[in-house]
Image: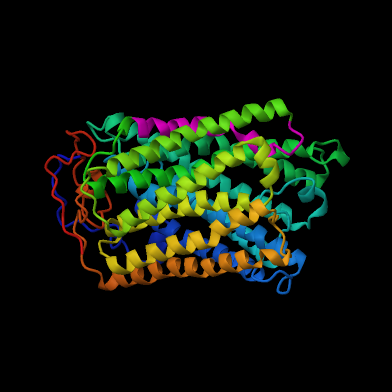
Amino acid sequence: MIAASAPVKEQKNYLNAENGLKSWLLTQDHKRIAILYLLSVTVFFIVGGLFAALIRLELTTPAGDMLDSNTYNKVFTAHGVVMIFFFLIPSIPAILGNFLLPLMIGAKDLAFPRINLLSWYVYMLGGTLGVIVLATGGVDTGWTFYTPLSTTYSNGYVVLTAMAAFVAGFSSILTGLNFIVTVHRMRAPGLTWFRLPLFVWAHYATSVIMILGTPVIAVTLFMLMLERGLHIGFFDPAYGGDPVLFQHLFWFYSHPAVYIMILPSMGVISEVMSTFCTKKPFGYTFIAFSSVAIAVFGFLVWGHHLFVSSQSAYAGMVFSILTYIVAIPSAIKVFNWAATMYKGQVRLTAPMLYAIGFIGLFTVGGLTGLFLAAMGLDVHVTDTYFVVAHFHYVMVGGAIMGYMAGIHYWWPKITGRMYNQLWAKVSCCLVFIGFNLTFFPQFVLGYMGMPRRYHVYPAEFQVLNVLSSGGAAILGLGYLIPAVYFLWSLKYGAPAGDNPWGATTLEWQTSSPPPTTNFEVTPVVTTEVYDYTNAEVPHIV
């Protein structure tokens, strides 16, 4: 994609345009807000990772000899709440989406800059409240807050934790609203819908889910708080409520929320594949519409979480079939990425290695999801470590691999500096190996019958648990190394130039880092998306 615009002339970039903490905390620049999100999301990732480390340390031995039962319940709840609500859901949309979406469509900013800044403050309010509660009192319900455990038997901190997730949900709503209006109203001249990068298509579909789904979980958590605090009967049978109603409402949002976490990663992979295969993604239109299809069908499959929760066999059959159908759009993407690599000029850079790793791990996660879509098999493995492994193959192997691919791909654009490719590739390999050592044994453990959320288990499961804990150590090292070479690159990295990868989308047609206004002159798009006809392919060291 070529922008018919004049080059930027000696304009200050967004990093040095203003100095001082106040200029950052009151900024309306979407790029600076993305950096604020990057810093805060990283902190929550570290916090959630520390809770995960405690879980794996405890499970190294069969006896509960490090944490007691109540503390272990609080630890795995904290891990789930922090990682899902404060890392996975906001990570790519809030960081990469915020930074890149206006640049990719030739806009100067998002449609509502003040609302964009407000979304970060709302996110920080919810996240800070959540971490304080988890650190001081803790919650023992699991991240799903199932009733009547959460409304009757859990400690009182569940109300504050639910409130933290409730508040954070408004950040997602504000971000989704901003993205939808921006894509509709602020595209550059000539940038038609089918000239949009697939990253934009993915975020548009994600924003639809945010707008439609997040209010449901917000209302559900508010009902939980009312029942716990005022004894208004919604879910607890003691007050005339129905506990299964909570599961229906919770999963009506929370299964589409899986796609809030994974769709943006899919958008990242499409961009990385195109750039490092030096060709237009195979089946561009199918990939674009598959993102929309995932957003639609994602709202129709929540019932597969209730196969063992008094749901009728007929309803279970319907949700089982729908779950198989929702896998089709994801399969379309995977096959089209593979076809894109076929006869492409593939360059095995660090972002490309993360993208290839994403395809492998996400495919395993998707295929094992089909096991859980089958009612008979799901009855056997539900609430076992099989579900834990499947979920992490999709979320960590998929969403976080996509996040890492995106950070490595756009880091030169964000900072104007290159990082060390060798160390980045080493880190990627450690993450891939460590991840599989951590979670693949859990498929076996789950099929053998080891239940999740227990810290005491039969001795015959210890070998696989030790292997899983050892893999977690390698995985943690793989995530730690990028922090070192990214920070190193800020001072010592080679200047990136405007387009170090030889990409064709609009964000690469402006300077690195971008100026505060993104483009000196509004670009005019005159070619099709991903047009590599006259593109130069740089040599990357």
On whether residue 290 falls in the magenta region, the answer is yes
Of residues 66 and 328, the one nearer the viewer is 328
Is residue 174 in view? yes
Q: What residue is at 50 percent from the left and 54 percent from the top?
A: 396
**Is 465 rendered above or below residue 150?**
below
Q: Quadrant of residue 422?
A: bottom left
Could you tell me residue 85's position as x and y percent? Answer: 57, 51
**Is 255 rendered above or below residue 400?**
above
What secondary structure is the stretch in magenta mostly built from? helix
Q: Quadrant of the N terminus?
A: top left
Could you tell me residue 362's position as x and y percent? Answer: 46, 47
Q: How many marks?
A: 0
**Is 7 rendered above or below residue 251?**
below
On whether residue 541 falls in the magenta region, the answer is no
**Is 351 rendered above or below residue 262?**
below
Q: Quadrant of residue 445?
A: bottom right
Q: Furthest-right residue in view?
A: 238
Q: What residue is at 63 percent from the left and 66 percent from the top?
A: 55
Of residues 384 and 427, the one nearer the viewer is 384
**In this rendering, position of residue 126 left or right of residue 96:** right
Q: What residue is at 21 percent from the left and 50 percent from the top?
A: 510
Q: Which residues fall within the magenta stretch?
A: 286-311
